[in-house]
Image (tube, grey):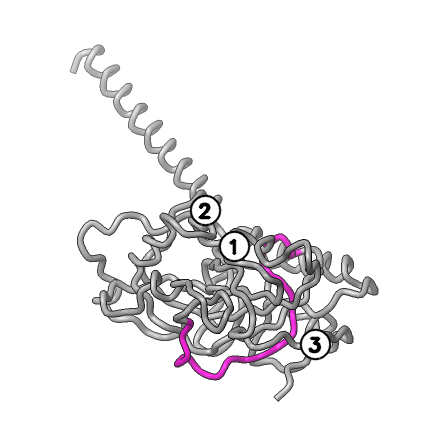
Amino acid sequence: MNSYGYVSLMLVALLAISVSAEKNLSTSKAFSLHSPVADHVIAGQRARLVKATEQQGFGPQSPRDIGVVKGDNKISFAEAPAYVEMNLCNIHFHKNAEHKGGEFDNYAGNGDGHGYHSGYVYSGQLSQLELAPVGEAGDICPSEHGKLELGDTIEIHYVHSTAAVKPGPTLGACLNDAIKNPQLRVEAQVYVLVADETALDFMQLTQLGINNGFHQALNIPHNTGPAVQYNGSTTGPGYNEKGSPFQVSWSVRPNVARVNGQSVGRWCKGNVFNEDHAHGVRNLIVNPDLLSKIEP
């Protein structure tokens, strides 16, 4: 081999090493972006939440383990009426369940520290057919934090208000100028996304109408177990280090329902709530001083 050929081979080898290193670096960066934060990060957030709420008069907080009845928060408020006697004002959902318990008690991990890739997931089993995409499925509710996939768990919040309001975007739709402190109730249902066309249709689960003079979601499931009722607050990762000032009556159903994944994607493409992606989750509230007692 002449010197020219030897130099050429060396350049090719060095180029291959460089490309390989760049690929490994990119993979490393991608992994670090999606790697869960360490336990001490979540512990620090919980500590700052304690400090921010201590002796400040905050009421009980959410989300919680619905299987734990203990709670030492002394702030009490009247339970909101049944949701059928209130106006539905907002519907949104979170990637993974914010609450823990029932059929959703598997921890997804610490996530990114900002509410994504954390929470709790369906603890049951899905068949290969339920996880097999049908045709060109397309992305389901994509966002900067990723997209939904078959097998994913979501927790949907049907938010209700005693104010004279109608369904609309954000919690602001639950308030009006006539009543600044309406009673709020959230009906929470956890779903798992499947490929089954015979599974529940998210478009039907969020169908709106008037019932007995109230704005309602007409098809909230009634066959997913007796709802756990407790007093808490609004949720979302924005409250990981501060207390939520909103008082909310919660009804959390313990059983998971199967929903057709593509129907969730269709809903994200257009709805009156301007919801097009899954929200992040708030850290589970474990401090008894921030929890209400669940009455039997």
| In the displayed structure image, the side of residue 216 where residue 17 appears, left or right | left
Q: Is residue 252 visible?
A: yes
Q: Amino acid at mark 1?
A: Gly
Q: Are marks 1 and 2 in contact (CB under 8 Å)?
A: yes
Taking 6 as reference, is 63 above or below it? below
Magenta stretch holds residue 238: yes
Distance from Cα at disc 3 to Cα at disc 1:
29 Å
What's drawn in magenta, residue-wise? 220-240
Extreme residue in the front direction: 213
| In the displayed structure image, the side of residue 250 where residue 117 appears, left or right | left
Q: Secondary structure at mark 1?
A: loop
Q: Sequence-wise, which precedes: disc 1 or disc 2?
A: 2
At horizontal 29% and vertical 57% (from top left) the residue drawn is 262
Image quarter where the C terminus lies is bottom right
Would you name the residue on which mark 3 appears? Answer: 78
Taking 81 as reference, is 240 above or below it? above
Q: Amino acid at mark 3?
A: Ala
Would you name the residue on which mark 2 appears? Answer: 145
Q: Secondary structure at mark 2?
A: loop
Residue 55: where, in percent of width, then height?
83, 65
| Chief SS of the magenta region | loop
Mark 2 vs mark 3: in front? 3
Residue 260: where, in percent of width, then height?
29, 63
Q: Quadrant of residue 80?
A: bottom right
| In the displayed structure image, the side of residue 181 where residue 225 appears, left or right | left
Q: Residues within 10 Å of mark 3 (few under 14, many from 20)?
A: few
Would you name the residue on which mark 1 appears? Answer: 280
Extreme residue in the right direction: 55
